[in-house]
Image (cartoon, rainbow, N blue to C red):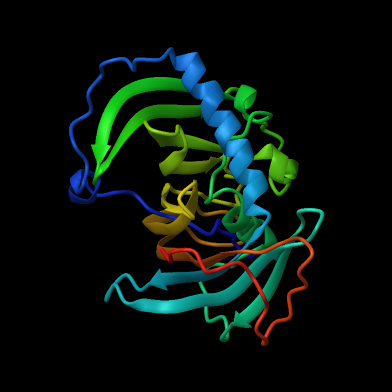
Amino acid sequence: MTRTLLLFATILTSTQAQQGFGPLDPTPPAAPIPQILTHMAQQESAFANARDHYTFRQDVTFETLAPDTNQPDGAYHQLTDISFDDAGRRQEHVVFAPANTLQRVTLTEADLDDVAHRLPFILTTPELPDYTLTYLGRQRVDQLDTYVFDCTPREILKDHRSLQVEDHRYFQGRIWLSQQDHQIVLIHGQAVPQDTRPGHENLSPPFTTYYQQIDGKYWFPIYTRADGTLHFPAHADALSQTVHVRTTVRYTDYKRFHATVTLHYGTEVPTTPNPPQP
């Protein structure tokens, strides 16, 4: 049985975790925490709607690293232009996709679905009741003042047959909100639940996604980093295996378009003036 793997794996090292991060101050915020979370969900819902009116480029690179040299011994790379139709359905146009040379792991449609829907985590009003958010404190991240919350799903569905269904997977980890507008600006965590059945493993080590304000209003994901080691136990069809993986996902060239505009790849399309680029 071919082993499968979710398309992200990163654990921040102690050095990386401290770079650009100020101390965590447990002082409560001025506004009530439930009010902040309600406003956050409203802001995230507005962003989810606004995102459907942007095009952007998604650059995914996934590599396995040889244990003796720590150099890539297999790679998947895909460059895709993303847009949304009038009904908000995601449209993908592959720009560049060299041959997939991965041999020790196999990517699935579920893996790519996580790239589209869980790495750029959005916590909207309808989704807020699915999570417990615990306030940790205030923290300065680079030049941004943030509120920090632990984010845990209230209930994790354990039916592994449903793992590939988007609504049955959740984010678990830590989120940072801008103190100014209560939008998500950084996340670190993983997609749960994980499938650990021998021969059916879908393993999901932690990932980190960074966001940047586009057009002076909403915070869009711009970069996801993953670097970690996955452990596959032995079973009847395969020996145990440890695989070091490294993943980056870059989201660039955000441009707003009007729903009445038809996109023609390879030709210039009238749009509003280009926003500042990440």
Residue found at x 47% / y 37%: 183
Q: Quadrant of the N terminus?
A: bottom right
Seen in the picture, residue 43 relative to 12 is either above or below; the reply is above
Seen in the picture, residue 36 relative to 191 is either above or below; the reply is above
Residue 16 location in percent, x, y? 23, 51
Question: Residue 9, can we see it?
Answer: yes
In the image, farthest residue toward the top: 32
Seen in the picture, residue 36 relative to 271 is either above or below; the reply is above
Residue found at x 56% / y 22%: 38
Q: Quadrant of residue 126?
A: top right
Question: Residue 155, can we see it?
Answer: no
* 276 lies left or right of 269: left
Q: Nearer the viewer, residue 207 or 72?
A: 207
In the image, farthest residue toward the front: 273
Residue 182 location in percent, x, y? 45, 32
Residue found at x 82% / y 54%: 87
Q: Nearer the viewer, residue 43 or 193?
A: 43
Residue 128 location in percent, x, y? 61, 26
Residue found at x 56% / y 76%: 79
